[in-house]
Image (cartoon, rainbow, N blue to C red):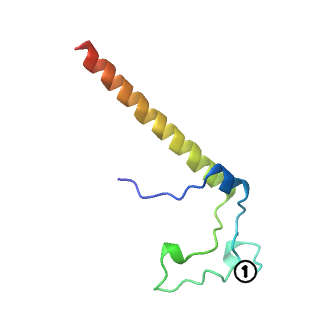
Amino acid sequence: MKPAVKRLTPAQIENYFPGKGCKCHAWVERECCCNTWNSAMTEQDIKVDWTPKEVYVLRNENHELEVRCQRLEQLFLEQLLQED
């Protein structure tokens, strides 16, 4: 099973920018101290997301293609079963 991938809705993508949630006014991730990592932190503790917007757009497109592919596979298998 694939690990869960963070995706955003189209409305969230519209308002998203890399570094959203940064309170220290950093320009790039390596300058940001908002997410200073410690061993007790989990993925949910990370408040600043430096992922480029394009990554979320591509993740959504990839998800849509995976859903279409699964549907086509299902239709193909149904067609094969009807022919037998």
The image shows residue 5 at horizontal and vertical percentages of: 49, 57
The image shows residue 68 at horizontal and vertical percentages of: 48, 34
Residue 55, by quadrant, is: bottom right
Residue at the spot x=70%, y=64% of the render? 18
Residue 20 in the image: above or below residue 68: below
Residue 62 in the image: above or below residue 24: above
In-image side of 27 versus 61 (left or right):
right
Residue pointed to by mark 1: 23
Question: Which residue sits furthest front?
Answer: 11
Residue 1 in the image: above or below residue 80: below
Residue at the spot x=63%, y=68% of the render? 49
SS at mark 1?
Answer: loop
Q: How many marks?
A: 1
Residue at the spot x=72%, y=53% of the render? 14
The image shows residue 52 at horizontal and vertical percentages of: 67, 59
In-image side of 68 versus 50 (left or right):
left
Question: Which residue sits furthest left?
Answer: 84
Image quadrant holding the C terminus, namely top left
The image shows residue 45 at horizontal and vertical percentages of: 53, 78
Front position in the image: 59 or 75: 75
In-image side of 15 versus 76 (left or right):
right
Front position in the image: 15 or 43: 15
- Structural crowding at the residue carrying mark 1, measured as other residues with C-alpha within 10 Å and reported as few (<14), some (14–19) or many (≥20): few
Residue at the spot x=70%, y=76% of the render? 22
Residue type at numbered disc 1: Lys
Front position in the image: 36 or 46: 46
